[in-house]
Image (cartoon, rainbow, N blue to C red):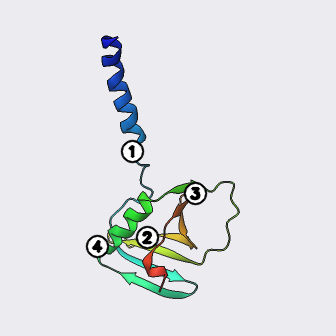
Amino acid sequence: MKRLLMSGLPMIFMLLLLSGCSESPLLVGDYVRMEVVKGATLVYKTKEAPEIEKAIKRINGSPREETQTWELPEPIGAIAFYSESDGDGIILPLFEGGVLVEGYFVETDFDFLKR
């Protein structure tokens, strides 16, 4: 019994550890500028690294759901992240309550949208 318990404990620990791991990040990169457009109006713009990192962490750490079978409404705007190296960026469609990233609807509630 003791042997069974000792061999099973590490397996249980590993399963608990793996189940607590978060999903892989959807946004990866070094971005130096972020812009948010709602409708046709620029509502937020920053080059502040902590603000950009906060938005990326929120997107990567928020609940997400695959949208393959969804019929999404028209976006209310977009969030764009621009990199310094090539000036290119990634533009994410913005919806009430979230953004669309690589086929996932990511539930976010950004403060800058409440302005």
Q: Residues within 10 Å of mark 3 (few under 14, many from 20)?
A: few
Indicate which disc, 3 or 1, sits on the residue closer to the N terminus.
Answer: 1
Mark 3 lies on residue? 103
Mark 1 lies on residue? 21
**Residue 114, position as x, y percentages in the image:** 49, 82
For discs 4 and 2, the disc positioned in front in the rendered view: 4
**What amino acid is labelled 1 in the image?**
Cys
For discs 4 and 1, the disc positioned in front in the rendered view: 1
Mark 4 lies on residue? 49
Q: Secondary structure at mark 3?
A: loop
Indicate which disc, 2 or 1, sits on the residue closer to the N terminus.
Answer: 1
Indicate which disc, 4 or 3, sits on the residue closer to the N terminus.
Answer: 4
For discs 2 and 1, the disc positioned in front in the rendered view: 1
Nearest to the observer: residue 82 or residue 46: 46
Indicate which disc, 4 or 2, sits on the residue closer to the N terminus.
Answer: 4
Residue in the picture at 39% in, 43% down = 20
Q: CA separation, marks 3 and 1?
A: 21 Å
For discs 3 and 2, the disc positioned in front in the rendered view: 3
Mark 2 lies on residue? 89
**What amino acid is labelled 2 in the image?**
Gly
Q: CA separation, marks 4 and 1?
A: 26 Å
- Tell me: residue 23, above or below residue 71: above
